[in-house]
Image: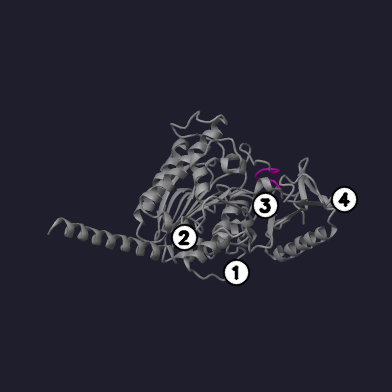
């Protein structure tokens, strides 16, 4: 064979491999893309640079430049347990029996196995893993997470400030979860390494990975190498560590040639607690209806599907994650059983949201309504108790296009809008009243 024939043969073989790779990419990207949901614990909008934060986050910045940043995304709740229940089921937490507070170590409540999670909906076509924090019940009926559709669980049962702290691993088909001791400083790195391994192990089939980091929830203990890398104290050091983990996950996906087949989502379960920054937003984790408790980061990347460098103000909710993933995977859901909506058009860069409103709950009480432009807040905490704004004669209606910080009520300027928002709140209260459960001891301040 002469040199010209050799070159032609090499070109033909190369073209064959390129065609095979392209066919593989197309078959993987539609209708079965991979999904990676990176969810932080108590991260605020003001903690990362794409939302104006002062802590350097170069890898998250790159994620924003390569994808879409949502400027009006709300977690399902202002606390961990209900928020995570809402994201995994696509339902308001009150409908899952988890609308009240967070689960404690000895709590007998949990996410019922009758509730279908993202992992349940995507099975059996998808391999699935929950790596990191669970916090949806440790009683035998709800534990381990492999009872909820996941093929693998590798993580901790609740927040890392709760004891005893141990690292568990469980696999589908077994009700047992083996445990091992773990130190807080190494926890996020353990999660990242196991997530990287899961991606490698499942490169040739569709997968859903929830990487549920337990940071920057207090206490903040950065891994070796990240100490004193931020001017924002140990909290900032841990955010730097989170940023590096995002970079590693993206690099793993890219190195395996899966970038165009994989939707990567970065978000938080709720706003910041005693440290961290909600940015210009009012209030924090556990607050009533103000944005600082549940308005959190949400960034997505999927080259070829999600446009690069786009910001959208379209409203979206954590309840929308399940129906959106299912729609992108070609899995049909029953919309009548879900509170979430398919917002894949928003992720693809569309300006408008299919959502008409977002309900803001505080425990099992509807305390706020957000539409694309307006926000109505019915009550707040004041001096150790709750204050009903209407009872006090101070209805709070905010124009979110003008006042992101919810500092100035314009209720007297827009009486028709106020009446509409109050009617929406009454309707939502009536709709979810049948799902209310007996309140735990010590919460006598809650409105009836």
**Viewport quadrant of the N terminus:** bottom left
Question: Which of the pair 148/11 is nearer the observer?
Answer: 11
> Alpha-carbon neighbours of circle 2 within 10 Å: few (<14), some, or many (≥20)?
many
Residue that label 1 marks: 337
Closer to the N terminus: mark 1 or mark 4?
Answer: 1
- Disc 3 on helix, strand or loop? loop
Q: Is residue 175 something one can see in this rendering? A: no
Element assignment for label 2: helix
SS for dot 4 = loop
Q: Residue at x 78, y 53 (%)?
A: 378
Left or right? Give the position of 157 relative to 258. right
Residue at the limit of the structure toward the left, as seen here: 1
Is 72 or 228 nearer to us in this picture? 72
Q: Which residue is labeled 4 in the image?
A: 393
**Which numbered mark, 3 or 2, is in the foreground of this view?**
2
Q: Which mark's residue is nearer the viewer, 1 or 3?
A: 1
Q: Quick one: label 3 or label 2, which is nearer the N terminus?
A: 2
Circle 2 is placed at which residue position? 147
In reply to whether residue 189 is colored magenta, the answer given is no
**CA–CA distance in space, label 4 to label 3:** 30 Å
Q: Is residue 274 above or below residue 356?
A: above
Q: How packed is label 4: few (under 14 Cα within 10 Å), some, or many (20 or more)?
A: few
Stretch in magenta? 281-288
Counting residues from the start of the chain, the first of labels 2 and 1 encountered is 2
Tell me the CA gap for discs 2 and 1.
Answer: 21 Å
Compare marks 4 and 2 and give the one earlier in the sequence: 2
Res 440 label: 3
| Res. 7 mark | none
The reply to whether discs 2 and 1 touch (Cβ–Cβ < 8 Å) is no
Kindly identify the residue that appears in the image at 45 percent across and 43 percent down. Answer: 247
Q: Nearer the viewer, residue 268 or 429?
A: 268
């Amino acid at each position: 064979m002469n040199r010209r024939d050799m070159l032609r043969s090499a070109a033909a073989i190369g073209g064959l491999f390129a065609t095979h790779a392209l066919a593989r990419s197309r078959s993987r990207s539609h209708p079965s893309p991979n999904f990676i949901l990176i969810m932080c614990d108590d991260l605020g909008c003001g903690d990362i640079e794409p939302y104006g934060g002062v802590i350097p986050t170069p890898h998250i910045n790159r994620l924003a430049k390569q994808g879409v940043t949502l400027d009006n995304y709300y977690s399902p709740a202002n606390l961990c347990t209900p928020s995570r229940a809402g994201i995994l089921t696509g339902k308001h937490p009150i409908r899952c029996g988890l609308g009240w507070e967070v689960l404690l170590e000895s709590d007998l409540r949990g996410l019922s196995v009758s509730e279908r999670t993202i992992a349940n909906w995507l099975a059996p076509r998808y391999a699935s893993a929950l790596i990191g924090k669970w916090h949806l019940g440790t009683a035998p009926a709800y534990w381990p997470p492999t009872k909820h559709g996941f093929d693998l669980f590798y993580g901790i049962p609740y927040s890392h400030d709760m004891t005893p702290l141990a690292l568990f691993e469980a696999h589908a088909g077994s009700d047992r979860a083996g445990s091992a001791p773990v130190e807080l400083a190494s926890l996020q790195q353990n999660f990242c390494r196991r997530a990287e391994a899961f991606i490698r192990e499942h490169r040739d089939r569709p997968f859903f990975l929830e990487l549920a980091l337990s940071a920057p929830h207090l206490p903040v203990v950065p891994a070796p190498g990240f100490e004193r890398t931020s001017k924002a104290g140990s909290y900032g050091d841990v955010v730097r560590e989170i940023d590096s983990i995002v970079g590693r996950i993206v690099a793993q996906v890219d190195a395996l040639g899966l970038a165009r087949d994989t939707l990567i989502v970065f978000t938080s379960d709720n706003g910041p607690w005693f440290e961290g920054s909600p940015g210009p937003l009012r209030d924090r984790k556990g607050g009533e209806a103000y944005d600082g408790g549940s308005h959190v980061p949400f960034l997505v990347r999927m080259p070829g599907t999600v446009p690069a460098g786009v910001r959208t103000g379209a409203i979206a909710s954590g309840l929308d994650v399940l129906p959106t993933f299912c729609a992108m995977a070609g899995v049909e859901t029953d919309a009548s059983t879900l509170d979430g909506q398919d917002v894949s058009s928003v992720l693809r860069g569309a300006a408008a949201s299919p959502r008409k409103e977002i309900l803001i709950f505080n425990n099992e009480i509807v305390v706020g309504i957000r539409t694309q432009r307006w926000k109505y807040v019915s009550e707040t905490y004041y001096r150790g108790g709750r204050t009903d704004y209407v009872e006090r004669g101070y209805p709070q209606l905010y124009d979110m296009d003008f006042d992101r910080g919810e500092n100035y009520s314009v209720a007297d300027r827009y009486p028709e809008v106020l009446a509409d928002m109050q009617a929406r709140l009454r309707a939502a209260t009536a709709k979810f009243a049948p799902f209310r459960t007996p309140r735990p001891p010590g919460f006598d301040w809650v409105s009836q």
